[in-house]
Amino acid sequence: MILQVVGFKDVGKTTLMQKIVTHFKVLGYPVVTIKHHGHMGEDITLPAQHLDHMRHFNAGADQSIVQGHQYIESIQRFDEMPLRTLIDECVTIEKSIILVEGYKYEHYDKVIVYRNEIEYEQLQQLSNVKFAVKRDITTSDERALFAWLTEWIQMNEG
């Protein structure tokens, strides 16, 4: 099962990913996260405790992968590869929920996170948008998201 969290830069995708990871872990699912390090000119440096993918890992993900430019967190030099190849070649946790932060133009189910109506309208143009969350998520919006996530898992397990 693959679910993407997408939005524009600094909108809160990583914070939302942490909440989603925690939710799935509470439900007892193995979780793998994949983050595209899209900040051109910024190298991935190790130890990478402050980077978004480590925030995913620290939230409970069983495996967390970051790809940026010519690197994958495993520190192997590699040209940019398609998300499907990254999943097929790097994900090692069997039967896991794969949460992907970024990769807007891939065609998996998506949760979009947005700041304003302009961003909302732009993100709605992406394929397979299934749920939308405003950046400053309220408690009731969070409950609605978790209810939807639980339904999403049930629909995709069978």
Image (tube, rainbow, N blue to C red):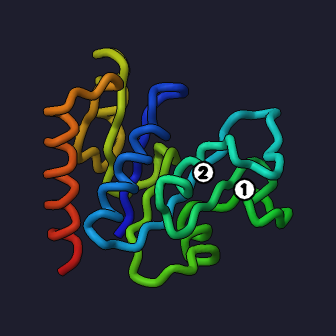
Q: Earlier in the sequence, mark 2 or mark 1?
A: 2
Mark 1 is surrounded, within 10 Å at the Cα level, by few (under 14), some (14 to 19) or many (20 or more) other residues, namely few
Determine the secondary structure under disc 1. Answer: loop
Residue drawn at the location 60% of the way across and 44% of the way down = 52
**Image quadrant for the C terminus?**
bottom left
Q: Is residue 11 above or below residue 84?
A: above
Specify the amino acid type for callout 1: Glu
Residue drawn at the location 55% of the way across and 54% of the way down = 58
Instruction: From the image, tell me which residue sits under label 1.
Output: 80
Q: Picture coordinates of residue 18 (x, y %)?
A: 43, 47
Q: Picture coordinates of residue 157 (x, y %)?
A: 22, 77
Q: Is residue 74 left or right of residue 22?
A: right
Q: Picture coordinates of residue 1 (x, y %)?
A: 34, 70
Q: CA distance from mark 2 to mark 1?
A: 17 Å
Specify the amino acid type for callout 2: His
Q: Is residue 134 above or below residue 100?
A: above
Residue drawn at the location 79% of the way across and 59% of the way down = 79
Q: Quadrant of residue 133?
A: top left
**Of residues 110 and 48, which is closer to you in this image?**
48
Instruction: From the image, tell me which residue sits under label 2.
Output: 53
Mark 2 is surrounded, within 10 Å at the Cα level, by few (under 14), some (14 to 19) or many (20 or more) other residues, namely many
Q: Is residue 15 left or right of residue 42?
A: left
